[in-house]
Amino acid sequence: MIADSINAALGGMQRNQDAFARHAHRIANAGTAPAEGNPGVNLQDEMVGVLVSRRGWEANLPVLRAADEMLGSLLDVLA
């Protein structure tokens, strides 16, 4: 159960970190010429994506901390 919580939090953090990197990459390359048939980058959408990814990462952090504390308490009881 604790391991499931840790894995869920880490998975959520990884997904949000990956999304953050994708949005940041698109923003960084916004000044380059878009490929043929590609409409280009909407900076507003990408900035919203960066903020959503950041908040998603931050939302998973308390879950990870709580699971870590529970695991520590369990180990203290077993010791």
Image (cartoon, rainbow, N blue to C red):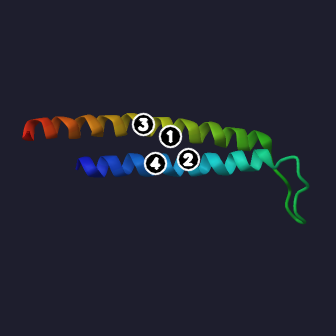
- Closer to the camera, 79 or 57? 79
Q: Amino acid at mark 4?
A: Gly
Q: Amino acid at mark 2?
A: Gln
18 over 37 or under it: above or below: above
Element type at marker 2? helix
Residue 54, located in which quarter of the rendered image? top right
Q: Which residue is mark 3?
A: 61
The answer for how far apart the CA atoms under marks 1 and 3 are is 7 Å
Q: CB of mark 2 within 8 Å of CB of mark 1?
A: yes
Counting from the top left corner in percent of width and height, residue 69 is at 25, 34
* Count of numbered labels shown in the rendering: 4
Element type at marker 4? helix
Q: CB of mark 4 within 8 Å of CB of mark 1?
A: yes
Label ID, residue 12: 4
Name, please, the residue furthest toward the bottom.
Answer: 36
Residue displayed at 47% across by 46% down: 13
The answer for how far apart the CA atoms under marks 4 and 1 are is 7 Å
Label ID, residue 57: 1
Q: Amino acid at mark 1?
A: Trp
Residue displayed at 22% across by 50% down: 1
Element type at marker 1? helix
Counting from the top left corner in percent of width and height, residue 49 is at 65, 43
Mark 4 vs mark 1: which is more N-terminal?
4
Left or right of 5 in this view: 47: right
